[in-house]
Image (cartoon, rainbow, N blue to C red):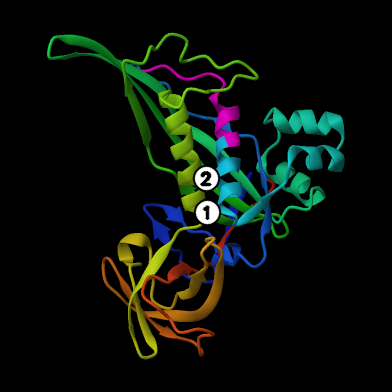
Amino acid sequence: MKLNIKSTMKTMVIFGVLSLSAALANADVKDRILIAPTGDISARCEDGAPIRGIERLARIEIESAINNSGRAEIVADGELRKAISEEVYEQYLSGKFDATKSVEIGKLAGAKYLLLTNLSRNEVTTRELNILGVKLTEVSVNLEASVQMIDVETGVKVLVGSTGKITASSRGFSPEGITELGKDAKITDGKDPRAIALKRLGEAVLNQIYPTYYVIDINGSTVICDFGSNKGAVVGQTLSIMRADKFGFRTVIATAKVDNILTDKCRATLTGSPTQKILKKDVVEPVMTETAQITEE
């Protein structure tokens, strides 16, 4: 498989990450997302051990984070089973399909986007502590996932990113059995560092899909946002300015084009009349119109 890069504007890079199009972010129309089974491509380290079976729980936590955000509709496994044969469904859950085949399954399921996540870090480490004469074991869970979002209709990647390293630690927690999770295992102890790390992973994936910035000042037809070169802002980029209601749902009230950038902020000029008065703390999301087309060798 190879990637043919087709650019329509300068890539917005955040430490090597492409931010998802703000078209995804319009809460008036929820996009349907098919979440592919999470894989584990992490390299093993000498100081830690992998948690076997955590991929399934990672996918569940990612789905929960997206659902709870109210910003998208997830294609349920029950819907997917109705759209494809049982044999194909079982192969799909096993992770045997590549991105191209998964996109085809997404089309059959009526999804707009396919979300691909793979654990690039999955390890448990322990260390012995002596605090005021009390000996304790500190257990740390380290997770990291790559995140890709593909437009099912076009096969174009609209997001390529990473959650970054996520660490959750617990003192006095027994490490016994922590590296093994059975097929249907659940983590019910909220103090379990695996549960904490998984929740943070889900939130980090959500933040990759919907990066959020804010208006920090307004001056006539220009707005200042906390979206600078360190976050991937580029001159000429279009921004959606959104108003969130009390339930967190967002509506686009204006668009603006970036014309000046500093390290931690940018200035943008409105491209039309806003539908509501723009306020400080209104949400700003960058619009992205470029990426990589997936094709077979």
- Badge 1: few (under 14), some or many (20 or more) residues near its Cα, within 10 Å? many
Say what secondary structure mark 1 lies in.
Answer: helix
Q: Estimate the x, y position of residue 154 in percent, counting from the top left.
A: 70, 60
User: Are the residues at dot 2 and dot 1 in contact (C-beta closer than 8 Å)?
Assistant: yes
Residue at horizontal 65 percent and vertical 20 percent from the top: 184
Q: Name the residue under label 2.
A: 147
Q: Mark 1 points at which residue?
A: 209
Asked whether, in this view, residue 102 is left or right of residue 148, the answer is: right
Q: What is the count of numbered marks?
A: 2
Q: Point out which mark residue 47 bears.
A: none
Query: Foreground residue, 82 or 48?
Result: 82
Residue type (three-letter) at the residue carrying disc 1 = Ile
- Above or below for 289 versus 49: below
- Residue lying furthest left in this view? 132
Q: In which quarter of the image is the C terminus?
A: top right
Q: Which of marks 2 and 1 is nearer the N terminus?
A: 2
The magenta segment: 48-60
Query: Foreground residue, 104 or 188?
Result: 188
In space, the residues marked 2 and 1 are separated at their CA atoms by 8 Å
Asked whether, in this view, residue 134 is left or right of residue 77, the answer is: left
